[in-house]
Image: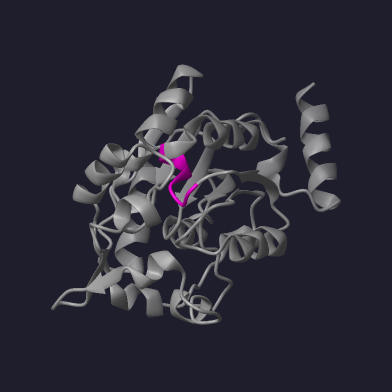
């Protein structure tokens, strides 16, 4: 039986199915937050996945540079034992694209996330059209770190939860070093791994059309959620369901 399984794996690889896609169900999930939030934005999704038996880790990225965020993610990946699903929200999509070449990673899940190709920067990707309502609310500080105007945050970032919950999220938002947006992608691991994408149909931060473009370019298994930008907060069940599909290789 072992020889048969090895032969089947070889056949799948020969016809172009990535090795990660041919392996067993992944039981580890690593969640990477985006800019203007912290890892607690994943708490609802993490709770649902843990109830399903997954081992879930939420990455505390510093948002000081792409390199630092990737290093923090790789450190969490090093602690995983066995096949892992790597998930990124918003800016976290850039991070998982760089860290996702780790051999433990079975698949990548993008949630309302940027997915630059090699050599592309977020600065270039976000300058192709008029700024969204959310980007208009982004403010720099004296050190070049960017944050969303707290008064606008509940509406532009997570407008489909009660205002009080949005205001609490605004208080916990993490600024990002604006220089990170000018750092080009090097790995773009979506070329190497199976990909899944959750489009937020009512996103005021990233245009839904841009999210659809990223998903199509990656040939991702795609779902559309009637959600604000912060779908892990407002629609955790739908996001968790997509991650579970990725873990099962469906």
Q: How many marks?
A: 0
Of residues 14 and 101, the one drawn nearer to the viewer in this rendering: 101
Of residues 148 and 106, the one drawn nearer to the viewer in this rendering: 148
> Residue drawn at (13%, 78%), measured in percent from left and top?
142
Image position of 203 with respect to 245: above or below: below
> Residue drawn at (34%, 73%), measured in percent from left and top?
180
Residue 162 drawn in magenta: no
Which residue is outermost to the left?
Answer: 142
Left or right position of 33 against 3: left
> Residue drawn at (69%, 46%), measured in percent from left and top?
19
Image spot of residue 81 (x, y percent): 45, 33
**Quarter where residue 238 is shown:** top right
**Quarter where residue 5 is shown:** top right
- Tell me the quadrant of the picture where the N terminus can be found: top right
- Tell me the quadrant of the picture where the C terminus can be found: top right
Image spot of residue 235 (x, y percent): 49, 36
Of residues 83 and 235, the one drawn nearer to the viewer in this rendering: 235
Left or right position of 167 against 131: left
Image spot of residue 52 (x, y percent): 51, 19
> Residue drawn at (44%, 79%), measured in percent from left and top?
123
Image spot of residue 186 (x, y percent): 50, 73
- Please provide the residue range marked out in magenta: 228-233
Residue 232 drawn in magenta: yes
Image position of 150 with respect to 86: above or below: below
Left or right position of 160 against 137: right
């Amino acid at each position: 039986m072992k020889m048969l399984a090895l032969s089947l794996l070889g056949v799948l690889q020969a016809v172009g199915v990535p090795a990660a896609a041919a392996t067993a169900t992944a039981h580890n999930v690593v969640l990477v937050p985006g800019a203007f939030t912290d890892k607690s934005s994943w708490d609802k999704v993490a709770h649902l996945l843990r109830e399903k038996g997954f081992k879930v880790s939420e990455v505390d990225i510093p948002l000081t540079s792409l390199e630092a965020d990737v290093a923090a993610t790789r450190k969490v990946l090093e602690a995983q034992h066995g096949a892992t699903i790597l998930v990124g929200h918003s800016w976290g999509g850039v991070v998982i694209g760089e860290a996702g070449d780790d051999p433990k990673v079975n698949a990548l899940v993008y949630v309302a996330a940027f997915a630059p190709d090699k050599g592309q920067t977020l600065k270039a990707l976000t300058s192709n059209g008029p700024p969204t309502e959310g980007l208009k609310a982004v403010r720099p500080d004296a050190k070049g770190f960017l944050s969303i105007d707290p008064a606008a945050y509940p509406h532009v970032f997570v407008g489909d939860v009660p205002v009080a919950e949005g205001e609490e999220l605004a208080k916990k938002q993490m600024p990002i070093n604006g220089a990170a947006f000018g750092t080009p992608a090097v790995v773009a691991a979506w070329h190497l791994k199976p990909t899944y994408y959750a489009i937020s149909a009512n996103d005021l931060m990233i245009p839904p059309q841009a999210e659809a473009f990223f998903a199509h370019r990656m040939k991702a298994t795609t779902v559309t959620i009637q959600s604000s930008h912060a779908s892990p907060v407002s629609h955790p069940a739908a996001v968790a369901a997509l991650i579970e599909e990725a873990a099962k290789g469906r």
